[in-house]
Image: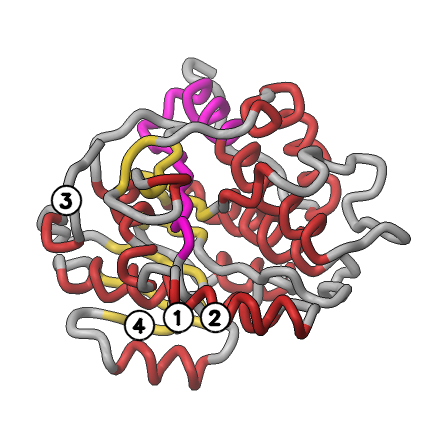
Amino acid sequence: MADNWNATRLPDLTGRTAVITGANSGLGLATAEALARAGAHVVFAVRDLARGGAAAAKVSGSTEVRRLDLADLDSVREFADGWDRPLDLLINNAGVMMLPEQRTKQGFEMQFGTNHLGHFALTNLLLPHVRDRVVTVSSAYHRYGDKVIHFDDVNLRGRYTPTRAYSQSKLANLLFTLELQRRLSEAGSPVRALAAHPGYASTNLQSHHASALARAALSVGNRVFAQSDRAGALPTLYAATQDLPGASYVGPSGLGEMRGAPALVGRSPAASDPEAARRLWTLSEELTGVEWGLKPAGS
């Protein structure tokens, strides 16, 4: 466990470039602030350029803002097509949480489409440029819901609930990380894939819950029980900068992984299933039209 580890203990990141999805608020902004303060050039990959620009202007350090809508695979491809330089850190942070039933531009269930498929496509398209690691933000909610990927219909038509969809998307984040690391190792790549979760952190995600009663309860929880977004960003920062094995999962070390210093944490059996991870990868390639690009070592 990294006792008392905090963002002031980041290494010097001068000369390194990080892309952070959803960097305009919450955990993403806290992550951006810390990385920029440590010397990294931070790219705010955001849906709303005006909001992203306003957020970046408050950050002390080197930043730029680029448009990325993870709920639109055309936007993901446009972002990746415009990238032409080395990338040290890709932080798949953006997400939506427990929304009323909605669809992405390509017709996918919004939480699965944004939280998983958008990041799946972005990662694979940018991977030839990545030099160090990919960190994907999951959630303790991967342990809840149905605890499976609904391969028969990931869009959950006729059985959608906000929690079921969110839990599936967060489970997908961990299975994606597991299979990504397997493929990177097989290809002989030095890049590492890791995952992190923030514990119970106060962000604006909770304000979009489909249930008004749940929104009210979460609002109280944010004020009374939750840690700050800066504390919630620590597991992501730890995963992004410390010497950890590929496929590591970092979360808070306190009771119930709700808060505390970052540490390596466990994941559910469903999130550790290599066969499910391979199956999800194949399905994600089919749904996005984005395929694995790195070749095995020696080929």
Residue 115 sits above or below residue 192 on the image = below
Question: In this figure, which residue is indicated by the disc labeled 1?
Answer: 223
Q: Residue 61 carries which label?
A: none
Q: Residue 4 carries which label?
A: 3
Label 3: how many residues lie within 10 Å, few (<14), some (14-19) or many (20+)? few
Under mark 3, the amino acid is: Asn
Magenta highlight on residue 3: no
Q: Where is residue 154 in the image (x, y as percent from the top left)?
A: 77, 44
Label 2 close to label 3 by CB (< 8 Å): no
Label 1 close to label 2 by CB (< 8 Å): yes
Give the left or right position of residue 231, taking residue 27 as reference.
Answer: left
Under mark 1, the amino acid is: Arg
Of labels 3 and 4, the one closer to you = 3
Label 3 close to label 4 by CB (< 8 Å): no
Under mark 2, the amino acid is: Val
**CA gap, disc 3 and disc 1:** 23 Å
What residue lies at 77% left-to-right and 64% top-to-bottom?
Answer: 101
**CA gap, disc 2 and disc 3:** 27 Å
Question: In this figure, which residue is indicated by the disc labeled 4?
Answer: 64
